[in-house]
């Protein structure tokens, strides 16, 4: 795929040659002209690939040529750049520099030839050029149990029925219900069951169903709509005449229209224009789609729109669907109970997968033997139509395609930390900068786009309301890995059984080398590829690979690096490095690397007390370092120079961590401090960190931390976590006045037994966690915590009650308890009863010792509320308070 290769080459050109005041090789005027010319032509080729992706044979052949050119050009450029940087004398440097200039000129000429070739290709029709190219997913008929109840979706069914026939507050306006979810999850099945519900059939005067098939055609869609309503075969050819007929037929009637598999924004606007939506008689439109579009805020803030997110089936629902389907004879499912858990795990809650497996196994004699065959086929090929998935993939913009394929480097069914994923995307150069928007924010938008398209699932949310972990469903992961390996981008080596042949043959055939255990063995070898990224998901993997062009080394066991110390000097392009523990040879790599952005050093066992390893201060010499994460086993002296690029720092606080140290990090946004010294430590004000948004201070047992009398926190702070610091009410008042604070964790910080919140305290706080064994009373006025959505109380054995004034908090969605005094739970229940009478219910959750303070999806439904709607409500409430 040319887009991945071009994206990588473009990122390399920007980083190595187009950064201001950052050339690593002297460039004369001629070389600069070649570089600018090459970069311009790369951009033009990217535009061509985006426009013609998925075209005819001539286009595909040219795309292959462009891909090979980009891969070869990047290899040659970086090899000569590496030769220059590693040269032992001036003569070798001069030779490498001349060769690099020659390669740049040659690459610019080759790119010009490819552009010339591209301009000669005719403007052939591209099947998926339109956003509305329908995806012909394999579908089964709706599966029902006896009595007409849909399998595993009873709750969804009743909810949608209620939305169709119930009226809220006496309103009868036209409403749109969107059923959203990934392919094969049962959107059409749910819509069918609702459409055929007897209550629904009786409620509406007229019903119509249109399935969007093929590329969107306005005339065809209009004719289908008119036919499903009137059953007339004599339909006018003129679109305007047909539209008027639809309008006139529906006018004055209570109608239900279902648009199945809607994939085109224009189709939605066209169809809505045919409907008499102003009759206010309770008419409804239901649409099923995989893509939630955020280009218009209408679906988020208008009460006439409701989005129903389809979820995967749980294990019980999955087995129920497997046992009650058209392919298995009555009671035949009992034969498969021995492999029940394997079927449930392999299908991963996707109804389509379950039905495919049931169909295959229903025809076999030897269940055990056939299941092994089916399982391997599913792991390798998936169950979704590859042609349909290819169409979906081709609909992505070019910069999204490479990010999508990158999910293949992670093991199937694994949870992926969003922060990790975003930093890897940035290190690879995948994120296109946008004016006035930081790269991490831009990368998060990419991820949101995948989720909106139902290509990626989110596992859970962070307490601040952002996606914390995500994953790719196994049905899509198979396609992702296969597509990436087919294009020579990824080699996912099975560490359970390495393939036959020299390891280097596979390692040098891809850009991304990932080592993890899997059940599919699918390899495509390209001799011209050189690895850029290696991912170790298995610590015991014994491999040998060239380090010369590596830019990402993730989750690296120290034993691997210690075994190849002579090659560490080749890591001149490294941008991302995470290692299981530090060893002496890494000092050279880190201190001399000009491109290193992220360094993560962890330890299998973070030891209590004094850190055992003192890391060299030369780590700070890496000029591009943005994220440094060290666990409690390591300590490092502060830098002697300003680190303007530093955004994230997690380290053990040195005893001399005072104002002069903080000033070294003027642009830092995320700071985590571990206090583990056995000596008293004074933490100076952090007000100098003007851009700090997240701060966490954690104090080990028996350590003493003192804050100045007039302690000042940065005004931009959004997230604050304090553990083990004794705070008087004056300090808590300072925290309560922070204007942007949204997230607060207070663990064992209360100096007294009473927390008296200052009037109008915590004006923007949305999440609050309190963990304290001595706190007895908590008081607040009715104008404090006005935006609080979620309250978590842990180990509050003495706390008698929550403030009664919380009944005035409109946005409160949940209060969670773990091992708290019964009286505080009773006070929350009293508050809950009052709120229920006002129609402003919230949830009370009581959890056990295994509690994790990160919310699950059901708990945080409030956080799924679109930010646009929440902002509008907050603005409205703010105006009311100002009037008062």
Image (cartoon, rainbow, N blue to C red):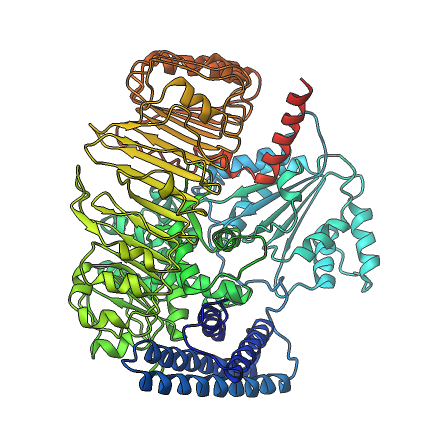
Quadrant of the rendered structure where residue 843 is?
top left
Q: Position of residue 797 (x, y in %)?
A: 29, 16
Name above or below for residue 166 compared with residue 81: above
- For the image, the number of numbered tags is 0
Instruction: Please say whether residue 412 is visible from this viewpoint.
Output: no
| Residue 800 in picture, x, y percent from top left | 36, 11
Q: Position of residue 22 (x, y in %)?
A: 45, 68
656 over 617 or under it: above or below: above
Residue 404 placement (x, y as % from top left): 45, 61
Residue visible at 49% across and 55% down in the picture: 439
Give me the residue at 47% from left, 24% from top: 736
Q: Nearer the viewer, residue 328 or 634?
A: 634
Depth check, front residue: 429 or 565:
565
Quarter holding the C terminus?
top right
Residue in the image at 83% along x and 58% along y = 240
Place residue 227 in its image quadrant.
bottom right
Quadrant of res 171? top right
Residue 234 visible within the image: yes
Decide if residue 378 is on the left or right side of residue 214.
Answer: left
């Amino acid at each position: 795929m040319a887009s991945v290769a071009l994206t990588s080459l473009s990122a390399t050109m920007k980083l190595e040659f187009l950064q201001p005041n950052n050339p690593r090789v002297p460039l004369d005027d001629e070389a600069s002209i070649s570089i600018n010319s090459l970069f311009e032509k790369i951009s033009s080729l990217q535009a061509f690939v985006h426009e013609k992706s998925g075209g005819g044979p001539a286009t595909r052949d040219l795309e292959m040529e462009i891909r090979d050119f980009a891969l070869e050009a990047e290899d040659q450029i970086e090899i000569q750049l590496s030769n220059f940087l590693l040269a032992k004398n001036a003569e070798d440097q001069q030779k490498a520099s001349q060769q690099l200039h020659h390669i740049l000129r040659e690459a610019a000429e080759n790119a010009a030839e490819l552009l010339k070739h591209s301009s000669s290709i005719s403007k052939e029709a591209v099947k998926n050029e339109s956003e509305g190219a329908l995806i012909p997913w394999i579908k089964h008929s709706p599966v029902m149990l006896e009595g007409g109840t849909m399998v595993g979706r009873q709750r969804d069914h009743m909810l949608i029925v209620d939305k169709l026939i119930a009226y809220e507050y006496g309103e009868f306006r036209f409403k749109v219900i969107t059923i959203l979810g990934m392919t094969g999850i049962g959107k059409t099945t749910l819509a069918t069951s609702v459409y055929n519900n007897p209550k629904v059939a009786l409620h509406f005067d007229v019903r119509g169903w249109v399935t969007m098939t093929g590329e969107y055609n306005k005339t065809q869609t209009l004719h289908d709509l008119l036919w499903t309503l009137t059953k007339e075969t004599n339909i006018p050819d003129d679109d305007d005449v047909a539209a008027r007929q639809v309008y006139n037929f529906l006018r004055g009637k209570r109608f239900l229209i279902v648009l199945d598999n809607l994939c085109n924004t224009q189709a939605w606007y066209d169809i809505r224009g045919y409907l008499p939506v102003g009759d206010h008689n309770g008419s409804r439109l239901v649409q099923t789609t995989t893509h939630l579009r955020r280009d218009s805020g209408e679906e988020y803030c208008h009460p006439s729109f409701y989005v129903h997110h389809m979820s995967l089936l749980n294990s019980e629902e999955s087995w129920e669907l497997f046992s009650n389907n058209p392919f298995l004879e009555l009671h035949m499912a009992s034969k498969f109970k021995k492999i029940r858990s394997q079927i449930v795990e392999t299908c991963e809650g996707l109804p389509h997968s379950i039905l495919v497996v049931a169909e295959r196994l229903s025809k076999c004699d030897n269940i055990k033997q056939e299941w092994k065959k089916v399982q391997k086929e599913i792991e390798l090929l998936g169950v979704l139509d590859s042609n349909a998935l290819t169409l979906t993939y081709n609909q992505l913009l070019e910069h999204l395609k490479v990010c999508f394929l990158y999910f293949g480097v992670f093991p199937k069914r694994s949870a992926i930390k969003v922060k990790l994923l975003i930093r890897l995307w940035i290190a690879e150069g995948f994120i296109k900068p946008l004016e006035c928007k930081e790269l991490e924010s831009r990368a998060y938008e990419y991820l949101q786009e995948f989720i909106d398209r139902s290509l990626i699932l989110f596992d859970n949310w962070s307490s601040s309301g952002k996606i914390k972990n995500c994953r790719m469903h196994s049905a899509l992961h198979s396609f992702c890995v296969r597509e990436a390996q087919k294009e020579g981008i990824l080699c996912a080596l099975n560490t359970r059984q390495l393939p036959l042949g020299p390891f280097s043959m596979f390692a040098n055939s891809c850009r991304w080398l990932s080592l993890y255990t899997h059940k599919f063995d699918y390899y495509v070898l390209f001799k011209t590829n050189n690895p850029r990224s290696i991912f170790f998901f298995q610590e015991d993997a014994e491999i040998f690979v060239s380090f010369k062009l590596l830019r990402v080394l993730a989750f690296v066991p120290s034993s691997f690096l210690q075994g190849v110390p002579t090659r560490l000097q080749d890591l001149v392009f490294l941008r991302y490095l995470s290692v299981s523990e530090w060893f002496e040879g890494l000092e050279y790599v880190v201190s001399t690397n000009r491109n290193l952005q992220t360094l993560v050093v962890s330890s299998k066992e973070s030891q209590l007390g004094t850190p055992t390893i003192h890391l060299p201060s030369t780590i700070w010499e890496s000029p591009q370092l943005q994220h440094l994460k060290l666990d409690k086993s390591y300590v490092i002296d502060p830098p002697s120079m300003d680190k303007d690029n530093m955004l994230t720092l997690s380290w053990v606080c040195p005893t001399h961590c005072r104002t002069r140290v903080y000033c070294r990090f003027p642009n830092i946004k995320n700071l985590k401090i571990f206090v583990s010294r056995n000596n008293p430590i004074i933490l100076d004000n952090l007000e100098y960190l003007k851009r700090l948004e997240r701060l966490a201070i954690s104090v080990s047992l028996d350590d003493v931390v003192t804050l100045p009398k007039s302690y000042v926190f940065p005004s931009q702070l959004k997230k604050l976590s304090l553990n083990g610091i004794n705070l008087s009410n004056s300090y808590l008042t300072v925290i309560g006045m922070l204007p942007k604070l949204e997230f607060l964790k207070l663990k064992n910080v209360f100096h007294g037994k009473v927390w008296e919140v200052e009037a109008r305290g915590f004006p923007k706080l949305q999440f609050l966690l309190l963990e304290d064994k001595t706190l007895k009373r908590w008081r607040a006025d009715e104008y404090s915590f006005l935006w609080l959505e979620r309250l978590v109380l842990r180990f509050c054995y003495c706390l008698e009650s929550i403030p009664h004034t919380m009944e005035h908090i409109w946005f409160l969605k949940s209060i969670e308890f773990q091992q708290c005094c019964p009286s505080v739970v009773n006070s929350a229940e009293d508050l809950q009863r009052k709120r229920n009478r006002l129609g402003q219910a919230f949830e009370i959750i009581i959890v056990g010792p295994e509690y994790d303070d990160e919310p699950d999806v059901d708990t945080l439904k409030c956080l799924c509320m679109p930010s646009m709607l929440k902002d509008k409500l907050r603005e409205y409430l703010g105006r009311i308070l100002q009037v008062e």
